[in-house]
């Protein structure tokens, strides 16, 4: 496809369950970002990959959050033992180049996670 | 502490008139600014950007103005069209003064263009 895709689009989890959210970036894009967007707020940074290397994970809210991009393309954001405060839209974005550029971040449609 | 602020949660304008969306920032490290547009159930879509070496950037109906001394930027849409109705996010990051790549977003402004 031409754009960033994410799956599933919607996920309902019971409190305490583990979830895995997938992101397929635009082919050839080096950089990949995960953001969390709470209702009525702007997206907030979670973590950043350059190829398979996770260069920044300063935005991950707790050690229950884990992200990987083992082959430098598809990425998975995993949340263990979900809590109600994890309910949000999780956005993935990719960009063509690495650091020090003004390249555009292209966003996927997001995964809406609801924790009951 | 919000580093990027959009103080107007909503704005309504008549079709054909000018829409002005405002954004303020506090972090002096920010020197690259972007506007994204978001429709419901879709991801944000890039609209226009400006770096701190410029004070204006124009692309068709969209113009972004940057006032570095006031740490303020604005997006002008002229003329406004009903299809412009969406949530607009201001975002910022370092470009010349740091290596951080992630964007810091404001909370968004819902623009409604009335026919």
Image (spheres, rainbow, N blue to C red):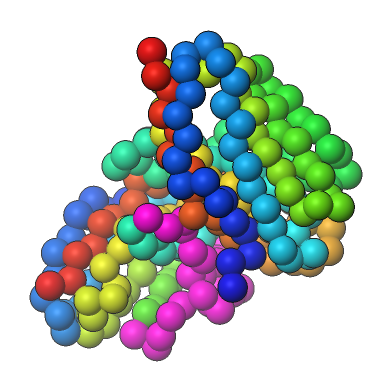
Left or right: B15 in relation to B105: left
The residue closer to the viewer here, A5 or B41, is: B41
**Where residue A82 sits in the image (x, y, percent)?**
23, 79
Q: Look at the picture and state if A70 lies above or below B13.
A: below
Does residue B17 belong to the magenta stretch? Answer: no
- Please give the name of the residue rendered at 47% of the width and 14% of the height, measured from the top-left corner: B15
- Between B68 and B38, the one lying in front of the other is B68
Residue at 64 percent across and 48 percent down: it is B23
> Which residue is nearer to you in this view: B48 or A53?
B48
| Rendered-image quadrant of the N terminus of chain B | bottom right
The number of discs equals 0
Q: Is residue B94 above or below residue A102?
A: below
| Residue A20 position by quadrant | bottom left
Q: Where is residue B20 shown, x and y percent of the image? A: 61, 31
Q: Is residue A36 above or below residue A29?
A: below
Regarding residue A90, the answer to whether it shows in the image is no
Res A56 → quadrant: bottom right
Residue B94 lies, in percent from the top left, at 75, 60
Residue A61 is one of the magenta-drawn residues: yes
* Residue range corresponding to the magenta coloring: A40-64
- Horizontal arrangement in the rendering, residue A92 relative to residue B96 (left or right): left
Q: Residue at x 41, y 85 (%)?
A: A62
């Amino acid at each position: 496809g031409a754009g960033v895709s994410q799956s599933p689009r919607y996920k309902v989890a019971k409190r305490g369950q583990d979830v895995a959210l997938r992101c397929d970036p635009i082919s050839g894009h080096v950089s990949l970002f995960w953001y969390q967007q709470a209702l009525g707020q702007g997206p907030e940074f979670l973590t950043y990959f350059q190829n398979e290397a996770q260069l920044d994970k300063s935005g991950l809210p707790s050690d229950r959050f884990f992200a990987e991009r083992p082959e430098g393309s598809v990425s998975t954001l995993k949340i263990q033992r979900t809590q109600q405060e994890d309910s949000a839209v999780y956005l993935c974005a990719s960009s063509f180049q690495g650091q020090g550029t003004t390249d555009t971040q292209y966003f996927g449609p997001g995964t809406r996670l609801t924790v009951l | 502490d919000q580093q990027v602020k959009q103080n107007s949660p909503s704005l309504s304008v008549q079709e054909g008139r000018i829409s002005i969306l405002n954004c303020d920032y506090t972090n002096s490290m920010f020197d690259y600014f972007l506007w994204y547009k978001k429709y419901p159930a879709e991801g944000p879509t890039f609209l226009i950007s400006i770096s701190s070496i410029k004070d204006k950037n124009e692309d068709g109906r969209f113009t972004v103005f940057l006032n570095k001394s006031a740490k303020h930027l604005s997006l002008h849409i002229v003329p406004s069209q009903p299809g412009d109705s969406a949530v607009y996010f201001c975002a910022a990051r370092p470009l010349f003064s740091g290596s951080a790549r992630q964007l810091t977003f404001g909370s968004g402004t819902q623009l409604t263009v009335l026919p």
